[in-house]
Amino acid sequence: MDIILLGPPGAGKGTQAERLVAEHGMVQLSTGDMLREARKADSDLGRQVAAVMDSGALVSDDIVSALIDERLSRMDAGEGAIFDGYPRTLAQAQALDAILAARGREIDHVVELVVDEDALVERITGRFSCARCGAPYHDNFKQPKVAGTCDVCGAHEFVRRPDDNAETVRKRMAEYRAKTAPILPYYEAKGLIARVDGMGSPADVTAAIDAILGE
């Protein structure tokens, strides 16, 4: 089974992809990870990726398509794929269909994690973590049991990601809507879109996705 996970940054796509990998043996195909992997590889495609990235230019759809095709070639026929971060445009969606069709595969479900923007801003901007061990906390949902002391390692220093601020989060939301808007009608017409409340607990979201997949 091949699926696409859609949702803005912070919606929980990474968490759900990890669960699908662990519970169903699926393979997560993240374009970001594939680009980094290709850059390290001493291959013609890897050198093309490195050259483009070093120049500061955007990697072309043709190169990304080649990366996905190469990765699919290394998967067993029985392994399902989770596409994360791709496709983002109508042209990419059409290219992905062609790549899959050539290998006798097709997209079975497009799962969109739907979130409330204000609630997502609160979720992301409240995050902080232990500077020593990385244990996660939140201003409103998960404070340390003893104020100023990490529950896990006992350290007293905490850090926040510099981009976990309201302005950046709302900008990411706007970018997500702009990028995904063109592909939603494409998959809607195919009857593939299923929407899940991304504001639920990770377990509830997992259960909803499993129901969609027929598990």
Image: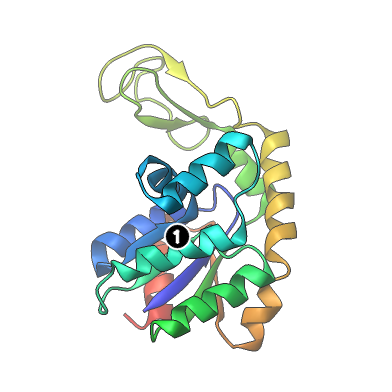
Residue 64 in the image, given as x and y percentages of width and height: 53, 59
Front position in the image: 5 or 65: 65
**Image quarter for residue 28?**
bottom left
Disc 1 designates what residue?
Answer: 67
* Residue at point 28%, 73% (across, down): 79
Q: What's under tag 1, amino acid-wise?
A: Leu
Element at badge 1? Answer: helix
Q: How is the image coloured?
A: rainbow
* Residue at point 54%, 47% (across, down): 10
Q: Give neighbour class at mark 1: few <14, some 14-19, many 20+ (Cα, 10 Å).
A: many
- Left or right: residue 191 compared with residue 174: left
Answer above or below: position of 194 versus 58.
Answer: below
Answer above or below: position of 106 versus 129.
Answer: below
- Left or right: residue 181 compared with residue 69: right
Query: In what quadrant of the picture does the C terminus appear?
Result: bottom left
- In the rendered image, is residue 78 in sight? yes
Answer above or below: position of 120 versus 160.
Answer: below
**Image quarter for residue 185?**
bottom right
Residue 65 in the image, given as x and y percentages of width and height: 52, 65
* Residue at point 64%, 42% (across, down): 121
Front position in the image: 139 or 34: 34
Residue 108 in the image, given as x and y percentages of width and height: 45, 82
Residue 63 in the image, given as x and y percentages of width and height: 54, 58
**Image quarter for residue 55?**
top right
* Residue at point 46%, 84% (across, down): 101
- Left or right: residue 11 compared with residue 74: right
Answer above or below: position of 13 versus 25.
Answer: above
- In the rendered image, is residue 198 in sight? no
Query: In what quadrant of the picture does the N terminus appear?
Result: bottom left
